[in-house]
Amino acid sequence: MRRRLAGLGAVAATTAALTISLPAAAHAADYCNGNVVAQHDGYGFSTRLIRSYDGRSICVNTWNQTGHQAWTKAELYDPTGFPAGGDFAPYYQYASTGWEPVVSGCWKWFGIPNGSGGWTGYQNCF
């Protein structure tokens, strides 16, 4: 019985150590690496429409460059106007939509505040 309790204690200690080492803010999706299709900057933010290296997927990453935690948005709409991916929360670093499969047509995306409480939209066609 002692051996079993000691084993449980070791598991609990390991779990606690892992929990402490996790980042403070979780993201809906991971940061996407690929080719930058378009980039816009403003109000302390930089948003990028990224296409995967194989060309089959796109993603929006928005970097919060304000130096403090702020509402950060990455939003993507497919050619039919359907929300394809979004991440909107108070982050210190970035928001990301995650990868979405590319279909032909014009995609709308958001990531830069417009200074009036809204968000500036952009469009790119594939």
Image (cartoon, rainbow, N blue to C red):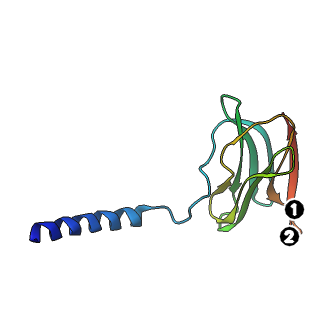
Amino acid type of the residue tagged 1 in the rendering: Asn
Q: Is residue 25 left or right of 52 when viewed as pictured?
A: left
| Camera-side residue of 7 and 71 | 7
What secondary structure is found at the residue carrying circle 2?
loop
Residue where numbered disc 1 is placed:
114
Quadrant for the N terminus, please.
bottom left
* Residue found at x 75% / y 45%: 48
Q: Position of residue 41 (x, y in %)?
A: 80, 51
Quadrant for the C terminus, please.
top right
Residue where numbered disc 2 is placed:
117
Q: Marks 2 and 1, how far apart in space? A: 7 Å
Q: Are marks 2 and 1 in contact (CB under 8 Å)?
A: yes
Callout 1: 10 Å neighbours few (<14), some, many (20+)? few
Q: Is residue 18 left or right of 110 when viewed as pictured?
A: left
| Camera-side residue of 103 and 72 | 103
Q: Position of residue 80 (x, y in %)?
A: 87, 46
What secondary structure is found at the residue carrying circle 1?
loop
Q: Position of residue 45 (x, y in %)?
A: 75, 57
